[in-house]
Image (tube, rainbow, N blue to C red):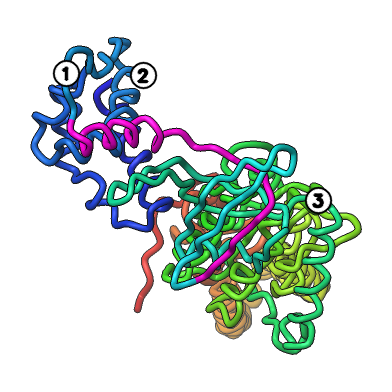
Amino acid sequence: MEQGIIQKLKDWRAQKSRDEHLEVFKILHNKTIEEINTILPRNQEEFVAIKGLGGKKFSKYGLEILAIVREFTGVEVEEPDTSGRVLSVSQYLDLVNSILNPVRVSVQGEISSFNFNKHAYFSIRDPKDGSVLSCFMWSTDYEISNIEAKDGMEVIVHGFGDVYKPNGKLSLRCLSMELVGEGALQKAYEELKKKLTEEGLFASERKKDLPAFPTRIGVVTSKYGAVIQDLLMNLGKFGYHLQLYDTRVEGALATRELLQAIQFFRKEPLDLLVVIRGGGSLESLQAFNNETLIRAILDYPVPVICGIGHDKDVPLFCLTADLAVSTPTAVAREINRSWESAIEKIRFFESNILNQYIPILTKAKGIIEKSILQSELFYQKVQEGVGRLNHVMIAILNKFHFLTEKWVTKQSDLTKQILTHFSTKLETISTQIDHQVKEIQKSSPEKQLRLGYSILFSREKVIKSIHQVSREEKIKIKVNDGEIVSTINEIISKG
């Protein structure tokens, strides 16, 4: 609950800062907010006892702050008791203002006695009975309203009542002003459009192209409603970093908040600024036909995308933006475009590379497999030939031995000579054959396997380099008496 009060007071302070064009610390210090959270004042006496507050603060903000405390504590605020008490004029006017200032009102009437002297002073008159209300408007608020006020013009002003103590005069402190009637709005729209067109603000040559592969995106819109959800749901998962500035997007007070959002993002490191809202009538889109707001995005440091639903009359803000589309979904598509295009190109190149290398790899695989098979068959034929040769030689020796024994008695000397000569020749031939067999066996894969070597295969291909495999990959190891399936845990390079 305590953190809730602190945050609520800070939000209230931020709004006051925007309304009154004051730094936040001039309204309430952080330490004062913490003290309010600790004491939880219920009445004027407890309020003014807090350091940093006092009678003036109570007359201006007291009832609003006490209402925030009541919202979180549920304790009824004690209204100031003035019965039986004599007030000074100043105290009474402070009391009146403490009641009037927190109440925001919208009043419609005809402008009269308009005078601009550093600030705007005028009255609004009720055409039905002639009632008149004095009005005052700071110059910055008047300029933001984007209206060239004239006597007789029907307007709606938004603000709060205030009594000016030096002369006791009641006036309406106007925060914003807007025209009344579709005809007046349309006329103002056409006049401003013509003016800005002649200045070249809508020219295509001054607009910036969207950056390729944007990631840092500022979003200006209301955090409530479906608009922001539409944007988020349609953005692709490309690592975007979105920063939302919550603002009003309709009504006279929206212009000021939109300006603050745009100025805030001017200092942020963005790739894109996005301003979005739903569709609406010319009246509801008036904030986006404001000249001050339009000029705020001229020469903006990053491209501005405007996604505002519209029909007949396109908001002038959209005509000024670097890119304008009609919905938040369309904004998301534009942001995604370069990323999606890059992914398509990567897929195409990947497919193209594979298509070019598959025939080469298939051919190489066939050559290797054929070579291994031919080597094994050749070695097998040699072994079979050696076996047959040994068999023939044994048969010859046996036969010759038989014949020599038969004739030994008659031709012993001749036999000895023949045997000696034949034995020498046989040894020479046998030596030559053994030499050839050994040479063949040296290059035989089967010989290498019997010596303790092995052949490694990855996906049926012989492994010749560490770059053919990766960790956790399964490989097949062929050894002398079978095959082994293993998984790679580590790869160590010679370099």
Quadrant of the drawing holding the C terminus: bottom left
Give amino acid for label 1. Answer: Arg
Mark 1 or 2: in front is 1
Question: Looking at the image, is mark 3 or mark 2 earlier in the sequence?
Answer: 2
Residue 430 % position (x, y): 59, 76
Residue 181, label in figure:
3
Residue type, mark 2 in image: Glu
Q: Is residue 22 above or below residue 108?
A: below
Q: Is residue 242 left or right of residue 409?
A: left
Is 10 in front, or is 458? 10
Between marks 3 and 2, how big is the CA–CA gap?
38 Å
Q: Determine which of the numbered discs, if any, sits on residue 85 in the image.
A: 1
Q: CA distance from mark 1 to mark 2?
A: 29 Å
Q: Earlier in the sequence, mark 1 or mark 2?
A: 2
In front of the other: label 1 or label 3?
A: 1
Q: Position of residue 12 (x, y in %)?
A: 37, 39
What is the three-letter code of the residue carrying label 3? Gly
Whether residue 393 appears in this view of the structure is no
Name the residue carrying label 2: 71
Dot 1 falls on a residue whose secondary structure is loop
Q: Are marks 1 and 3 in contact (CB under 8 Å)?
A: no
**Location of residue 476 with respect to 370 vertically, above or below:** above
Near mark 2 (Cα within 10 A), the count class, few <14, some 14-19 or many ≥20, is some
Residue at x 47%, y 54% (from the top left corner)? 471
**Residue displayed at 61% across by 75% down:** 295
Q: Are marks 1 and 2 in contact (CB under 8 Å)?
A: no
Tell me where the magenta segment starts and ends, as one range.
Answer: 88-116
Residue 108 in sight from this viewpoint = yes
Where residue 264 appears, as percent x and y from the top left, is 44, 63
The answer to which quarter of the image holds residue 399 is bottom right
